[in-house]
Amino acid sequence: MRTPGRVLVRGGGVAGLCAAHELHAHGFAVELVERQAEVGAGASGLAGGMLAPYCERESAPEDVLRLGRHASDWWNAVLPGHVVCAGTLVVAPPRDAGELARFAARTEGYEWLDEAGIAALEPSLEGRFRKGLFFREEAHLDPRAALLGLSGRLKAQGVRLHFGATEPPTGRFDHVVDCTGAAAIGAVPGLRGVRGEMLCLETAEVALARPVRLLHPRHPLYIVPRGGGRFMVGATMIESDDAGPISARSLMELLNAAYALHPAFGEARLIEARAGIRPAFDDNLPRVIRDGGTIFVNGFYRHGFLLAPATARQAAHLMQRKAA
């Protein structure tokens, strides 16, 4: 059977790898180029990996919930064993209890927990918080492991991946899908950079089974367990396209917030501290844009792993119509 054409996918982050997977599944011959030398070396490797459409709805439009509701099912189907379906816990210090009520008013899919309910979910937090919100249907994954797993699956399916390259070695392509993220700022109208900074801490004194969001009027943060006593702590949101090292202020704020969740984080080892640029449009939602012979998939802001499956399907369907 004749294939609908050859597609070059530019960008090997979560958007590009998901797009390559969906395009291949729709019958296209796919090849991918990524300027970073390794899988996960770009901004996608700094993500929290939270598949949390209900929590993200608190500060995002309804489309985040609509598009992201089935993300965990997609990842489970594509990479069995990578998704942890343990929900999300949201807490706040007693002095900031009003933040919990505000959070609850802006979303859905939660149940209220008292102090005993929080301790039953996360024994390490026993006695530390009086009330919390539990989003039972949410999930999370390790972004770097997921990117490696997805790239390995694509290779096994015959998709050619070229890391450390800006152009494929040879060949002519019928279509191009551009998923280059922040590199497209200036080329895609309306795309801007939002700086995000993260830490990785290691301690044997805290055990968490799921992402925990700590609400704070100035410094809300999330802590995501990575296994082996390691935790990803994130993230700042700064309107800047400066990709330089994490700032001293951000480092202190993230560490102070982690300490507020559990004092043992004050003695944790700092394994990693990095910054990346999140590409975003004015509504902080991703877009699939057809411009001449290229389809642009960009603007994921803080929703890459949550929304990339949905936009990949959109791009594949648009490409099918284009190829027809």
Image (tube, rainbow, N blue to C red):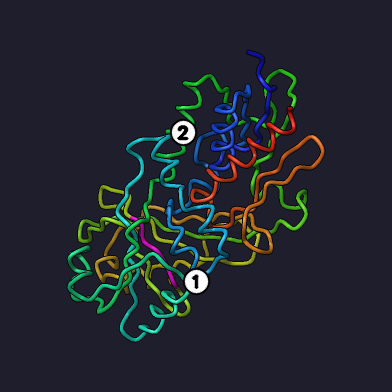
Q: Which residues are magenta?
A: 220-224
Residue pictured at 65% horizontal, 18% vertical? 3
Residue 46 in picture, x, y percent from top left: 48, 50
Residue pictured at 37% horizontal, 83% vertical? 96
Q: Which badge, 1 or 2, comes first in the chain's sequence?
A: 2
Neighbor class of circle 2 (other Cα within 10 Å; few <14, some 14-19, many 20+) is many
Q: Amino acid at mark 1?
A: Arg
The residue beneath circle 1 is 249
Residue pictured at 45% horizontal, 27% vertical? 152
Above/below status of 231 relative to 174 = below
Residue 100 versus residue 190: which sits nearer the camera? 100
Determine if the magenta segment contains residue 272.
no
Q: Secondary structure at mark 2?
A: helix
Do tag 1 and tag 2 residues touch (Cβ < 8 Å)? no
Residue sitting farthest toward the bottom: 95
Residue 194 in picture, x, y percent from top left: 61, 61
Q: Amino acid at mark 2?
A: Leu
Above/below status of 307 relative to 105 = above
Residue 84 in picture, x, y percent from top left: 32, 47
The residue beneath circle 2 is 150
Q: Tell me which corner region of the image, top left, top right, bottom left or bottom right, holds residue 91.
A: bottom left
Q: Tell me which corner region of the image, top left, top right, bottom left or bottom right, holds residue 268.
A: bottom left
Residue pictured at 42% horizontal, 33% vertical? 149
The C terminus sits in image quarter: top right
User: Viewed as shown, does residue 151 lie left or right of 180?
Assistant: left
User: Viewed as shown, does residue 299 lie left or right of 50?
Assistant: right
User: Viewed as shown, does residue 314 lie left or right of 157?
Assistant: right
Residue 145 versus residue 36: which sits nearer the camera? 145
User: Which secondary structure is most common in the magenta stretch?
Assistant: strand
The N terminus sits in image quarter: top right
